[in-house]
Image (spheres, rainbow, N blue to C red):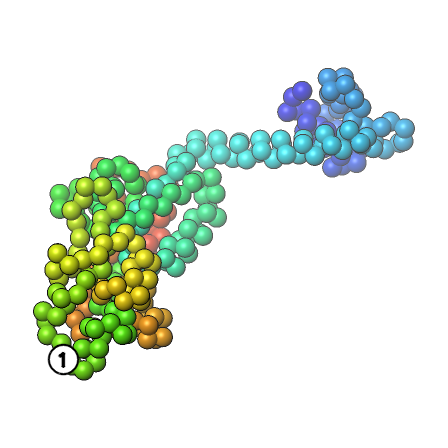
Amino acid sequence: MTLDQLRVLEMIVSTGSFRAASQNLHRAQSAVSYAIRSLEDELGFQIFSRAQYRPRLTSQGEAFLKKTRDVLFQYSELAETADFLKRGHEPTLRLAVSALWPLPTLVDALKDFSRQFPQTEIKIIHDVLSNDEQLLGERADLALGHIFNDRSLLLTEKLLEVNMIAVCANRYPLALAAAKKKMAKDDFKKYPQIILASTVPNSQRSAGISHPDNTLSVQDYLTKKAFLEAGLGWGRMPEHLVRDEIKRKTLVTLPQKPEIIPCHIARHSQKELGPCGKFIWNYFSRGQKNKRL
């Protein structure tokens, strides 16, 4: 059984006759007939009934044709993938995405990406404070978020700014004190601060801690928001992630100066991007600059 025989079978069925198939394949009709006879001999059953003028599939032939079309489709996909890789496209692209990053912009980028590079697998690495470590440790090809570039080994481009605001549940003691305008600066240290810790093992990074001995550490903003709404403490949140909760008044803002966090796209300076990586870089570089969230 050969791929060529399967293609001949598909062409006969698609065109409706051996003659039409031979014309489409630019072969003699005898060669088309021989390909099918040889296939039938190998399979041990008839694919076509010869009782009528036009070829008609037998019941075995119908079942075999279904699998034939699956094989031809898979082969076509395989050929496309081989051509894709031959042209230097990456089979996998790893993106380290900060918890700060607004997901709608990422979703839009990946929709465009998947249309242009359907053969490339995207792996998302959710990170909090250690996107640079993901790049330097060669666990990611690109990073989106707040980038530490202490050793100047990364190429970065600032894209947007995230407004971090202090919030707590509406009945939390800090909220009640703020409503009565009876808050002192040191009051924040009296209550647990819910913070995000780095997702990289052994990393000591954390950000904006008022009192290191009175914290509750989590690894994602969804958990942090749930803890805040439950009244387990106070904390800073990206404003775009708590707008709805503030409108519903399940969370309230606290009188603490907002912190502006710059977010970048970054890659290792000594690692060249392939076509897929360049697409993501250019997508954000051209369309996401200087936004404030």
**Residue 113 horizontal/vertical position (percent):** 43, 48
Answer with the quarter of the image where residue 69 lies. top right
Answer with the quarter of the image where residue 241 lies. bottom left
Quadrant for the C terminus in the image: bottom left
Q: What is the count of numbered marks?
A: 1
**Residue 258 horizontal/vertical position (percent):** 19, 68
Q: Is residue 202 left or right of residue 95?
A: left
**Residue 12 horizontal/vertical position (percent):** 75, 32
Q: Residue at x 9, y 69 (%)?
A: 186
**Residue 169 horizontal/vertical position (percent):** 28, 70
Q: Is residue 4 left or right of residue 172?
A: right
Q: Residue at x 13, y 43 (%)?
A: 151
Q: Is residue 215 above or below residue 69?
A: below
Q: Name the foreground residue: 14 vs 74.
A: 74
Would you name the residue on which mark 1 appears?
182
- Let me know if residue 86 appears in the view: yes
Crowd around label 1: few <14 · some 14–19 · many ≥20 (10 Å): few
Q: Is residue 161 left or right of residue 46?
A: left
Q: Is residue 63 left or right of residue 247?
A: right
Q: Residue at x 21, y 73 (%)?
A: 173
Quadrant for the N terminus in the image: top right
Q: Name the foreground residue: 148 vs 179.
A: 179
Q: Name the foreground residue: 10 vs 125.
A: 125
Q: Secondary structure at mark 1?
A: loop
Q: Is residue 106 above or below residue 15?
A: below
Q: Residue at x 43, y 33 (%)?
A: 85
Q: Amino acid at mark 1?
A: Lys
- Let me know if residue 289 appears in the view: no
